[in-house]
Image: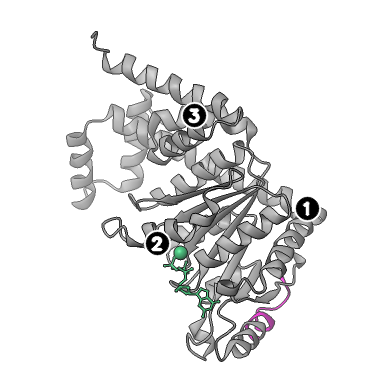
Amino acid sequence: MPTLSPSAFQARKCERGVGLVDQMQAGDRRALSRLVSIVENGGEDSRRALAKLYQYTGRAQIIGVTGPPGAGKSTLVNELALEFRRRDTTVGILAVDPTSPYSGGAILGDRIRMQPLGHDPSIFVRSMASRGQLGGIARATGDVVKVLDAAGFNKIIVETIGAGQAEVEIAREAHTTVVVEVPGLGDDVQAIKAGILEIADVFVVNKADREDAQKTQRHLQAMMQLGGAPREDWPVPIVMTVATKAQGIEAVVDAIESHLSHLQTTGHFVERERQRVEREFRSILQGLALDLVQERVGPEQRAAVVARIQARQVDPYTAAERMLADALGVAELK
Ligand SMILES: Nc1nc2c(ncn2[C@@H]2O[C@H](COP(=O)(O)OP(=O)(O)OP(=O)(O)O)[C@@H](O)[C@H]2O)c(=O)[nH]1
Ligand SMILES: [Mg+2]
């Protein structure tokens, strides 16, 4: 068998990624799964596939579902998906792995819990397996969302645990963020993370079958009143649910749909999209610049510069400018 040179091998793989986009557009589910994996792994294959499918994106409503561990997010997402299907809406679901990549328990848990959806071709479920490097998960999640968007799913639900920076970043990418709270996490206002108010478009108090659910609802109301005028003129609704009994689910879906119409009729939708596209373009530019430097400046040379910065022989601003200029083959950046 003739062996391919690394670059020819690379080229063939890329072509395959691009060909998969056509197959996916034609409704091929396996092509969709493969594309999701390619994009999750990142790199050149992923970039090419994304470049090809980008033209088909921008149609789905992206819904973030976040909240503390064990709040019932997956149970809720499962029910939301079923309700969307009853309304003839197709749904892609991404569960961002809340645990370390070594345990695998939560991933399996999510798969099993979401299994009833697995047989419906209008629902696609995927768990993001690994946290990867810092910030990597946010990048990978955004890219997989694009694949699902291009595949034509009307709603894309992304489940994350509302704690770290990556989750906040993912929430910023969503059109509508649902924050799930549960009763009994503590009675003081501090127990509900302050940052959560900034990202919530819909509050869900899940496990409303438990004592103190009303108290949690009152807390959220009080916090929002303290927060002043509603952001984007949207009064954030609080919906009580018992996800395990499918109670309150219709009200959550109604709230998600109302939020979308609100964004659209007020012009906030277009503005959010503009900000998102700009952020994304900037981060792609940054990534490319970094890749370029890493390709053209060897690791020893980069390490030497880091050592000189550490020894205060050069400042990092000047060093970065010089290194980028070197990589670009120009005498000076400005
Ligand atoms: N009593 C009660 N239990 C619920 C409710 N919703 C979910 N649960 C239970 O809470 C537990 C956690 O549910 P999950 O849906 O896995 O919660 P999660 O937020 O996705 O969990 P992580 O992804 O691990 O953070 C499960 O045992 C559910 O059966 C509810 O409304 N009431
Ligand atoms: Mg979960």
Residue assigned mark 2: 109
**CB of mark 1 near ligand 1 (< 8 Å):** no
Mark 1 or 3, nearer chain start: 3
Task: From the top left corner, tell me how far across and down residue 307 is, in percent.
Answer: 18, 46
Q: Is 313 colored magenta in this rendering?
A: no
Mark 1 or 2, nearer chain start: 2
- Check the image and report above or below for 218 versus 251: below
Residue assigned mark 3: 49
**CB of mark 2 near ligand 1 (< 8 Å):** yes
- Check the image and report above or below for 38 versus 307: above
Q: Residue at x 36, y 23 (%)?
A: 329
Q: Is 225 colored magenta in this rendering?
A: yes
Q: Nearer the viewer, residue 97 or 167?
A: 97
Q: Secondary structure at mark 1?
A: helix
User: Which of the image's four quarters has the N terminus?
Assistant: top left
Q: Over which residues does the magenta segment extend?
A: 222-230
Q: Nearer the viewer, residue 27 or 43?
A: 27
User: Quadrant location of residue 251?
Assistant: bottom right
Task: From the top left corner, tell me how far across and down residue 111 is, in percent.
Answer: 43, 56
What amino acid does circle 1 point to? Gln
How far is mark 1 from mark 3, CA to CA?
Answer: 29 Å
Residue assigned mark 1: 264
- Check the image and report above or below for 233 versus 130: below
Q: Residue at x 30, y 55 (%)?
A: 101
Task: From the top left corner, tell me how far across and down residue 290 is, in percent.
Answer: 37, 37
Label pair 1/3, CB-CB below 8 angstroms: no
How far is mark 2 from mark 3, CA to CA?
Answer: 30 Å
Q: Nearer the viewer, residue 282 or 79?
A: 79
Q: Secondary structure at mark 2?
A: helix
